[in-house]
Amino acid sequence: MSEGAGRQGIALSDRQRIAWLRLIRSDNVGPVTFRDLINHFGTAEAALEMLPELSRRGGAVRAIRIASRADAERELDMAERHGAAFVGIGEPDYPALLRKIDGAPPLLATKGNRKIASDLAVGIVGSRNASIAGAKFAGMLARDLGAAGYAVVSGLARGIDTAAHRASLATGTIAALAGGLDRPYPPENVGLLEEIASGNGLAVSEMPFGWEPRARDFPRRNRLIAGIGLGLVVVEAANRSGSLITARNAADFGRLVFSVPGSPLDPRAHGTNALLKDGAIVTTGAADILDALAPLREPDLFSGPVGADEPPREDVTLPPSDGDRGRIASALGPTPVEIDEIIRHTELPAASVYLVLLELDLAGRLHRHPGGLVSIAAD
């Protein structure tokens, strides 16, 4: 196991795991909303009971769909049949750095060597239409990083991702999927995924089993790659590519971003060269990555409580009045704003503001943006 990570946490009970899975699979409940619900109501079971009332108060035009216990049990059974398991955000086998990002998935479907989640990792991403030289260099970096004790995380895509995974099969690799663990993409990498999950590797996904990946699911997958790694390396990336989205996520999460320079005449280098102009670390060999990451391998980086136990229930005050609810809703518009700005503007208690935002969110009337910003959805 890599230095500094360690395996900390408290296991969820079977009852909690079912309730957590039901909550995250219910309509309009994403990772941030899940966290807010748990923080406010104390347990997933209590939050599930309140979903219909919160959605109604938020102005929902139809009843919110709540995942049933039978739905959750079926998904857990399907995971077991595929040799997979769901790991909660505070459990020992949840990736140590991923739990620290905003909007971390409360549950991850995992398959393979779950101990690798405790290893320090580095992401490697790049062009699907990789050059021979680019794929070779990505493989060299992956092998050298693996030899230095890092797991390599990537997205199972063609090109650079495939080269990075294959080169780190022996030392440890993590594949983040955009669809369910039983729906890998692209189809030609089904065999590679089996090698990863049956060897010294791990496959992870926040999506339900049976979920076919769509275009909008890949940016969600990209944030997993950025969040799991201590740093991110980009090898060949065109402008407006998914790799640049992953790099932006990594920078937002406080990760180091590394970029391999390329010819200005090669469109596959336009994105990587742009990253260098924006301050990414020039990378011409694994030593550049290892030297930059060395100070971040301190054990204290991962210290602190990380229990999966649900927090004590907050003192739940009476629901906000219709007048307060109207003041909060009217303070919102199509332009994203910080929640602290809403609190200052309305001069209402923070608990009331957060509760109304939860109501609007569950009613499908709130948009959440990166950085914790929110805006109102058009009616």
Image (spheres, grey):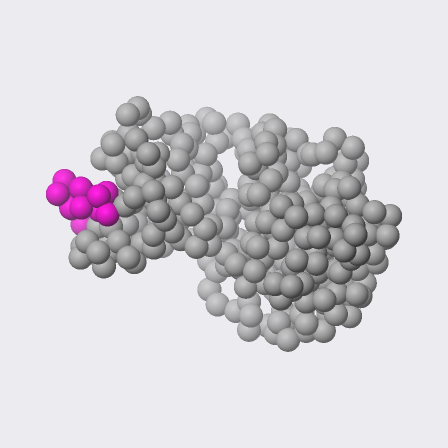
Magenta residues: mostly which secondary structure? helix
Q: Residue at x 76, y 60 (%)?
A: 261
In this view, the residue farthest toward the front is 265
User: Residue 203's spot in the image, x, y percent?
Assistant: 67, 44
- Residue 347 lies left or right of residue 86; in this view the side is left
Q: Establish if 221 lies above or below 346.
A: above
Q: Establish if 373 lies above or below 220.
A: below
From the image, which quarter does the N terminus lie in? bottom right
User: Residue 124's spot in the image, x, y percent?
Assistant: 71, 54
Q: Residue at x 42, y 47 (%)?
A: 369
Instruction: Count numbered badges in the picture.
Output: 0
Seen from the viewer's position, the closer of residues 323 and 308 is 323
Residue 80 visible to an observer of this rendering? no
The part of the image, by quadrant, that contains residue 109 is top right
- Residue 317 lies left or right of residue 130; in this view the side is left
Residue 351 visible to an observer of this rendering? yes
Extent of the magenta region: 317-331
Q: Residue at x 18, y 57 (%)?
A: 347
From the image, which quarter does the C terminus lie in? top left
- Residue 57 lies left or right of residue 215; in this view the side is left
Q: Is residue 365 magenta?
A: no
Q: Residue at x 69, y 34 (%)?
A: 185
- Residue 163 lies left or right of residue 89; in this view the side is right
Seen from the viewer's position, the closer of residues 9 and 291 is 291
Seen from the viewer's position, the closer of residues 81 and 156 is 156
User: Residue 227's spot in the image, x, y percent?
Assistant: 57, 55
User: Residue 91's spot in the image, x, y percent?
Assistant: 53, 53
